[in-house]
Image (cartoon, rainbow, N blue to C red):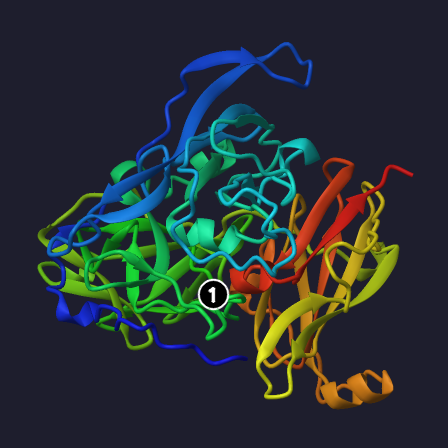
């Protein structure tokens, strides 16, 4: 991958700031403004929300000036939608952003040419089983002064989803500016498990950003002012729910912590200090079959994890949430015992494994990187095919396919498919040089089963370097045009995204 170029003005060292002086903000719960007929002609009236995209100024640390951000609904992250499975919602997404962007646009990228408006936006509900007209197709962007109303049927199992910008060619900049938020779906089956709820359920949105000394966002650029795109953006300031080094007061009992990696490109490897167990109960698309106890939790960009942490044994002490050498936040545990309902259930929700024999087709799809003469990354592709080429993946509605994701690069790529959920079958190392020179797929070891915390339904899968990752995908939902892509946003904005179309015949 290409090297990062130091900004002309050094960025702020976040470690120069006092830690744990700001309380952790909790997302505002979105409230409907009306009830309107569902567009599916069911006759049902569903909650209607209106959310504005707007520029705001917010303090991300007590000792910094207010930072300019772009927000949904006046906060970063935006308001959290708390919804029920089977009960659809309508959301009007109104673009009230400024006419000029404040982050560096690369007009050489496909979809971000100089003839395009500088500020464009479109919303994608990541993980939503959504009709194509409401999925946020990257070319369906609209400009300030316009809005779009999308219908989310919620005909899916409970899960922590998230919404974010998806505008072609500037998606990485719009999300870096702050355009993201959470969307929760619940149901009676999950309610019956009596997991920690209410104030004992805490969402955490992880984001890394670079800041200038004046507290403003700094986004890295290449040495070429005409082509400022860089292959990754790793920030030194780690924001949790929009705050730097926040703290949270907790009772000495179990909490349900629902975590999103909302970073552009950073992988988080989370742990607790002192060395306390986490019990993961869910992944991208809902509950696991049973809790998985772990010391470390890895999350790629776009992945979510649902974990239970029992603070009872740390009564009267403080605990840190860490990622490798980075300190993210502090939990302050009350000194008095706290009553709670029962133990964590030993079983959660069945996740029947899909038999490979159900697949009617296996597709072999490569992940590729283009390099120039000095091995600088010039961009990535899926299956060596640029975005604008004709659609080649056309699965049939209600069919099952296996996708073999062949990673020819040196990076781990989190691959996300819109509209569907899938299961990871296995991963297997292979000789990438032999494949690239002779087209021969020669494996270098046995297939490795997914990790125990990957045995639930997924919508984003880590595809390791020089490894074939197989996923099995039921194309259940709606016919129409969707996309699949790498969720490292810098890659996605530079061609590592392709359309696919679900066909009825």
Question: Considering the image in quadrants, where does the C terminus appear?
Answer: top right
Residue in the foreground of this view, choosing between 226 and 277: 226
The quadrant where residue 486 appears: bottom right
Q: Residue at x 59, y 69 (%)?
A: 413
Callout 1: helix, strand or loop? loop
Image check: 150 left or right of 381? left
Residue in the foreground of this view, choosing between 504 and 285: 504
Question: Considering the image in quadrants, where does the N terminus appear?
Answer: bottom right
Residue assigned mark 1 = 265
Q: Position of residue 152 (x, y in %)?
A: 58, 30
Image check: 123 left or right of 441? left
Image check: 302 left or right of 340? right
Image check: 378 left or right of 33? right
Q: Residue at x 60, y 49 (%)?
A: 168
Using the image, determine if residue 246 lies above or below residue 71: below
Q: Residue at x 48, y 19 (%)?
A: 48
Residue in the foreground of this view, choosing between 240 and 167: 167
Using the image, determine if residue 23 lies above or below residue 327: above
Q: Position of residue 111 (x, y in %)?
A: 63, 51
Q: Is residue 108 visible?
A: yes
Q: Is residue 77 visible?
A: no
Q: Position of residue 52 (x, y in %)?
A: 41, 30
Q: Residues within 10 Å of mark 1 (few under 14, many from 20)?
A: many
């Amino acid at each position: 991958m290409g090297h990062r170029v130091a900004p002309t003005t050094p960025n702020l060292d976040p470690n120069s700031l006092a830690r744990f002086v700001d309380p952790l903000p909790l997302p505002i719960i979105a409230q409907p403004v009306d009830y309107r007929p569902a567009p599916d002609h069911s006759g049902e009236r569903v909650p209607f929300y209106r959310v504005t995209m707007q520029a705001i100024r917010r303090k991300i640390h007590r000792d910094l000036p207010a930072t300019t951000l772009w927000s949904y609904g006046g906060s970063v992250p935006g308001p959290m939608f708390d919804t029920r499975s089977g009960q659809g919602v309508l959301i009007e997404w109104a673009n009230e952003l400024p006419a000029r962007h404040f982050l560096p646009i690369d007009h050489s990228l496909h979809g971000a040419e100089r003839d395009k408006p500088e500020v464009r936006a479109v919303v994608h509900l990541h993980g939503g089983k959504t009709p194509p007209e409401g999925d946020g197709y990257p070319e369906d962007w609209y400009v300030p002064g316009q809005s779009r109303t999308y219908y989310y049927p919620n005909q899916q199992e409970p899960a922590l989803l998230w919404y974010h910008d998806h505008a072609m060619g500037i998606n990485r900049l719009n999300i870096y500016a702050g355009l993201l938020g959470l969307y929760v779906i619940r149901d009676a089956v999950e309610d019956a498990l009596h997991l920690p709820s209410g104030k004992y359920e805490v969402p955490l949105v992880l984001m890394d950003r670079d800041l200038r000394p004046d507290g403003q966002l700094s986004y890295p650029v290449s040495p070429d002012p005409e082509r400022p795109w860089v292959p990754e953006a790793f920030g030194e300031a780690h924001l949790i729910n929009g705050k730097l080094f926040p703290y949270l007061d907790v009772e000495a009992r179990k909490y349900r912590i629902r975590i999103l990696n909302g970073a552009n490109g950073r992988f988080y490897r989370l742990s607790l200090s002192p060395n306390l167990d986490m019990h993961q109960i869910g992944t991208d698309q809902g509950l696991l079959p049973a809790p998985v106890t772990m010391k470390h939790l890895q999350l790629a960009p776009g992945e979510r994890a649902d974990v239970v942490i029992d603070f009872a044994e740390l009564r009267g002490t403080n605990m840190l949430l860490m990622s490798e050498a980075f300190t993210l936040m502090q939990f302050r545990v009350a000194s008095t015992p706290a009553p709670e309902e029962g133990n964590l259930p030993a079983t959660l929700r069945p996740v029947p494994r899909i038999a490979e024999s159900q697949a009617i087709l296996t597709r072999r799809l490569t992940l590729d990187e283009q390099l120039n003469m000095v091995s600088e990354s010039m961009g990535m592709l899926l299956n060596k095919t640029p975005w604008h080429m004709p659609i080649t993946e056309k699965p049939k509605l209600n069919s099952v396919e296996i996708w073999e994701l062949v990673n020819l690069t040196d990076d781990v790529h989190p691959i996300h498919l819109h509209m569907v959920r899938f299961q990871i079958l296995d991963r297997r190392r292979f000789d990438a040089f032999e494949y690239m020179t002779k087209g021969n797929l020669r494996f270098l070891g046995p297939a490795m089963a997914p990790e125990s915390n990957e045995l639930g339904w997924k919508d984003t899968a880590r595809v390791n370097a020089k490894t074939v990752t197989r996923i099995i995908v039921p194309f259940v939902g709606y016919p129409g045009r969707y996309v699949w892509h790498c969720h490292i946003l810098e890659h996605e904005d530079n061609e590592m995204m392709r359309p696919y179309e679900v066909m009825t015949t």
